[in-house]
Image (cartoon, rainbow, N blue to C red):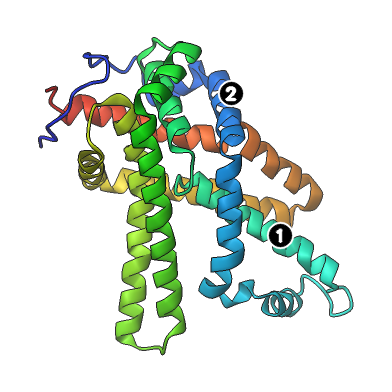
Amino acid sequence: MKLGRIQFEDGIKPAVSGGFWRTFGRNWSRLISCNALFLICNIISMFIAFFMVLTMFPFLFKIFLFENFKDFLVSNGMFTLEEATDEAVNSIYYLVSLICEMSLVGFLLIINGPIQCGICYYMRNMITGDASFKADFKKGVKENWKKGLGASIISLLVTVILIFNIGYYKNVSSGTVTLFVQGFFIWCLVFWSCLQLYVYPLIACTKLSLKDVYRNAALFFLKKFFSTLGIFLIQMVLFFGLPFVLIFLVSQVGYAIAMLFYILFSFGFVIFLGTYQSWKLIQKYVKEQ
């Protein structure tokens, strides 16, 4: 397998300095810092994601319409009819919207591309055992901000189109063809989410055009199909499943734990996992130009 037309950012292809968990354990404090940096620099991305959830998700899921959401809470025993005041329902509605917003950002579908390039470049050097945050982050952003910004805009547009198509075919007349087309767009969204794991490490660590970045990201996905889907499932747990369980089953303590996961762990871990796998693949399959 040859994924050619690659030129490395610094002209070298340094080796991974240890196994995944060993490298993670050695750099866990740095990853917490990267997680915090990611959150701070993606505030605008979160506002965009929150706007998308409020405007597009009611079209995608009828339960996101306020009256339907209220009926859902009452019918599932979360509230009695007397307890289901507008204020109480609104608080749960916005918590659910927050989880969905964090999921869109956590799946790297709506993010600050230049900042992501800087973090991935720093993490690449962290993995190879030769990292300097200030120098690496600055270089990663400075040399790749245009492609990073382009990738984030492309991701936003493709995500909006895919969600719109899923919602459209979900609301038209039912039938085998409609279900097939709807399933096709759902799979496209999963595929697109998986691709994002490789896009920014490829931008940060190689000198590729955006077209070749996406081409190689798709080949990486196919080469590591099951492990990539495994990472996708980890993202589902970290950004969707675990927060729902903690917030709605463990009450206030669970809410605090979920916030700690967001602030200290989830985003940095996923980016590190994607960068680690990307760099291993680049080392093994990519030819230096």
Q: Is residue 89 left or right of residue 108?
A: right
* Type of the residue with mark 1: Tyr
Give the label on residue 33, or none. 2
Q: Position of residue 136 (x, y in %)?
A: 42, 16
Q: Is residue 30 left or right of residue 157?
A: right
Secondary element at image label 2: helix
Whole-Å distance between the Cαs marked 2 and 1? 27 Å
Give the residue pinned by disc 1.
Answer: 94
Determine which quarter of the picture holds residue 99.
bottom right
Q: Quadrant of the N terminus?
A: top left
Residue nearer the viewer, 21 or 1: 1
Q: Residue at x 53, y 24 (%)?
A: 31
- Residue 181 visible in image: yes
Query: Farthest right residue?
Result: 82
Q: Is residue 239 above or below residue 166?
A: above
Point out the tag, 2 or 1, that comes first from the N-terminus.
2
Q: Is residue 131 above or below residue 247?
A: above
Q: Position of residue 74 (x, y in %)?
A: 76, 77
Q: Is residue 152 left or right of residue 237?
A: left
Residue nearer the viewer, 160 or 100: 160
Q: Quadrant of the C terminus?
A: top left
Q: Position of residue 235 (x, y in %)?
A: 48, 47
Q: Is residue 283 above or below residue 260?
A: above
Label 2: few (<14), some or many (≥20) within 10 Å?
A: some
Label 1: few (<14), some or many (≥20) within 10 Å?
A: few
* Type of the residue with mark 2: Ser
Determine which quarter of the picture holds residue 263.
top right
Q: Position of residue 65 (x, y in %)?
A: 65, 75
Give the label on residue 209, or none. none
